[in-house]
Amino acid sequence: MKDRSRWLPAAQARAPLYAGVDLGGTNIKVGLVDDAGRTLAFHTEPTLVERGPEDVCRRMGQAVQTVASLAGVPVERIARAGLGTPGPQDLAGGWIIHAGNFPGFEGFNVRDAVSRHSGLPVTFANDATAAGYGEYWIGSGKGLTSLVLLTLGTGVGGGIVIGEATVDGAHSHASECGHIIVDPSAGARKCPCGQTGHLEAYASATSLVLMAREAVAAGQAPALARALAGGVELTPILIGGLAREGDVPAMDLILESARWLGIGIVSLLHTLDPACVVLGGAMSFGGEDDIVGWRFIVRIRQEIQARAFAILAEQTPIRFAMLGGDAGYIGAAGLARLEHRRLSGATLPAPQSL
């Protein structure tokens, strides 16, 4: 939340306060949040993962101190910090199992290191789960009893919240919604995880770009081909822009991603029966107020209508996320709030369904 005019003055905050830390491959985002989910201060800085895990964790801890200073409150007023990182993780142990874009983090206890450097107890979560909780707490799922968030970016992340509890699983591997099977055929696309037929292989920004390259190579997307010949980088933003200008092949690529996403969501509806499905991440195409975003989500709903039980298709809202890039740190702070209240014996009000 870069706009300081939207920060809540500390004098108006509802105690206790919580820090939320969202660790990304490019940037670290840290916010100070009150008991109602309102942001008092925000800070971001480059991750600089090449400096190693201890340095990254030191700067995350220092960033917690920074947001307290920006808000004009002593760190002692912060009850707990929440930390969201990419997975897979060992949530109970506090470390990332497969570091991916975070070399050196395997076997390094990121939770305890951030706690040591911030001077606060830390609640550890998957970054998509944290974002899901943020949307559940004060975003698109506010007031509902449950929610599934799908983050559509480089991959497809997932966060599941049911009755104030996140679904983490016995091995910290639950809510990996991007890895449900949507195509069991022998010729299924390969997911970045190495397996085939996963939703992520069909409905992520990476897969959309790959399908676009295939269309260009086959001579099926001349406008994209001309853009690439002119040195423009092939991204979902480029594809969405051409679709917005009326380019049919570009729109068809986006709608094909939407079709696969609808197929994946049907499995989630039949398994979880959530009160709402929320779509976040970079592939929102401007949301429902934009013609491309509107057609994207309408195509998803059409696929659900065709494949899901009627009551699920008719009564489960499919929405775009509200919190944008703030969802991660807000949700991490919210999960810290949950743990603080559990440990202190406090109760949370029951969510109300629509």
Image (tube, grey):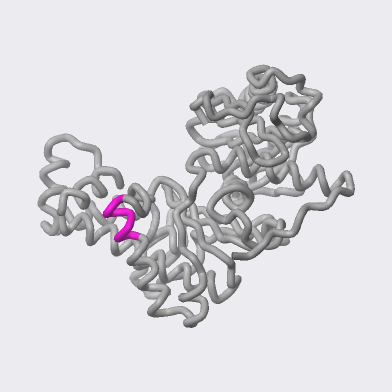
Q: Is residue 225 left or right of residue 204?
A: left
State the image coordinates of residue 3 (x, y, percent, origin top left).
49, 27
Q: Nearer the viewer, residue 239 or 77?
A: 77
- Would residue 48 be visible to someone looking at this image? no
The answer to whether residue 323 is above or below residue 258 is above
Looking at the rendering, the stretch of residues picked out in magenta corresponds to 290-296
Q: Residue at x 21, y 52 (%)?
A: 243
Is any part of residue 166 visible from this angle? yes
The answer to whether 110 appears left or right of 211 in the picture is: right
11 falls in the magenta region:
no
Residue at the right extreme of this rendering: 345
Q: Is residue 326 above or below residue 7?
A: below
Q: Where does residue 170 sit, x and y in percent of width and height?
A: 73, 61
The picture quadrant where one finds residue 174 is bottom right
Q: Nearer the viewer, residue 49 or 21?
A: 21
* Quarter assignment of residue 15: top right
Name the spot of residue 266 as percent of width and height, x first.
47, 73
The residue drawn where x is 30% and y is 60% is 295
- The quadrant the C terminus occupies is bottom right
- The residue drawn where x is 15% and y is 53% is 246
- Residue 149 spot, x, y in % from top left: 53, 56
Q: Residue furthest bottom?
A: 310
Main secondary structure along the magenta-highlighted residues: helix
How many numbered discs? 0
- Residue drawn at x 70%, y 35% is 34
Q: Residue furthest front?
A: 12
Q: Nearer the viewer, residue 72 or 302?
A: 72
Q: Quadrant of residue 203?
A: bottom left
Q: Is residue 305 above or below residue 6?
A: below
In this rendering, position of residue 181 left or right of residue 72: left
